[in-house]
Amino acid sequence: MPRRSNLWANVEQIILQHYDELKNRRIRGSYYIVREYLTQRLKEGKITEQEFNHFLSAQGYATYRDDLWPSIEKQYGLERPEAKPIGIIYDRGVERPISEFEKVYYRARGFIFVEKADEAEDLKELSYHGWAIVAGQGFSTRLMRQLFKLDGRPVLALHDCDTAGEWIYRVFDVGSRRTNHLKLWLENVIDLGLHEDDASLLALPTQPEAGKFKKFRNERVELSALSVLKVRWGVENPVLAYTIAKMRKLGIRVTPTPEEARDLLKDIVEERVKEAFEELSDKLWELFTIPATAASKFADELSYPDAEIVDAEVPQIADIDLDFDEPIKRLKEVLEKEFEKIKPDVIEKAQKAIDEAELLDEDEYEQKIISKLSDSRILSAIAKLSTPKEADA
């Protein structure tokens, strides 16, 4: 048995020393970062290889997640990294529940389906450029594939480098046995990986493959393993940098065309105008206090006998003739006139922002965003891979 007290003492020291680096990571990503620092301690002889291998095991991760972090929270008051909830979409940087997928679907220029919600959050920057970032619980839902089947917009699949991850992609590519009769496989799906060649070029750490998949492979590499590149190369968002590198390698534009950009901008302007009316919405909320106040006053004005019980049938509101159509119509007219008054100022400010914005052609804008969000070393490493077309040539 490993000398666990020494192992976990070292892990605790690493967490305390690098907490500022770990606190904004999710629990699985933080595990890989700690693993990277623990590798150095193995080289220095501070832990044994047996202890290190225990940390790499499923039991080691469970102890790290479920025992060590709660202990550190209790002893030092340091908050434990958390995992994201399952079933989310990122649209223009906003996190939405998976139930709103259809609403997002109709205004996206493309989709990136991510196996895990943790890594989906890393890609939310791409949602500002029209990509809908979708994360479900492992396999895609039938609704998603039915909608994806309707048009040719690209669907990119990002998954772990393991048997389950490959199957997640294949559900898009060739369908599943349960829905084979529906013919839901897609012509427009692209596999971003993570692939074995990617993991090898980036020297990502491996984990043992899950027991039920041992017959297919011995080792697996999780997307979370990309977190080690933050330690090695100082990459702030390795998942995003990797995704952009793969998109660039496969010839997929990160940024929208001018036509797509105009549609995105129009949607954003609409959202900003709606935000401008939030104060009005708060004021309109006061209207909803009228019924409660009126009801209380009505009830107070009735006379109630002191000594007897009143056995009366109180009439339902529906039985009372209430005609609010005319006052509501007048209120609507008043509000519409007020909207017309502020319209020139709203348009002037929005137009000024558009007129003063930097104008770039497609390639300039693409390069600007890639330089901002990616990493040159990851771009260079992924560029060494051959695409399927290049391999066939």
Image (cartoon, rainbow, N blue to C red):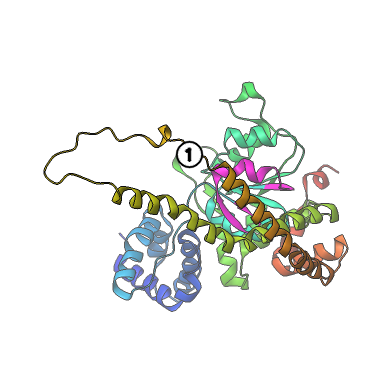
- Residue bounds of the magenta highlight: 90-111
Q: In the displayed structure, would residue 180 be above or below residue 29?
A: above
Residue 243's spot in the image, x, y percent?
Answer: 68, 56
Q: Secondary structure at mark 1?
A: loop
Outermost residue to the bottom: 17
Q: Is 302 situated left or right of 217 in this image?
A: left
Q: Which residue is mark 1?
A: 322
Q: In the displayed structure, would residue 151 be above or below residue 241?
A: above
Q: Does the magenta portion include 105?
A: yes
- Which image quadrant: the C terminus? top right
Q: Is 97 situated left or right of 308 in this image?
A: right
Q: Is 26 situated left or right of 200 in this image?
A: left
* Front-most of residues 71 and 87: 87
Residue 242's spot in the image, x, y percent?
Answer: 67, 59
Please say whether residue 244 is visible from this viewpoint: no
Query: Residue type at mark 1?
Result: Leu
- Which image quadrant: the N terminus? bottom left
Residue 311's spot in the image, x, y percent?
Answer: 20, 34
Outermost residue to the left: 307
Outermost residue to the top: 181
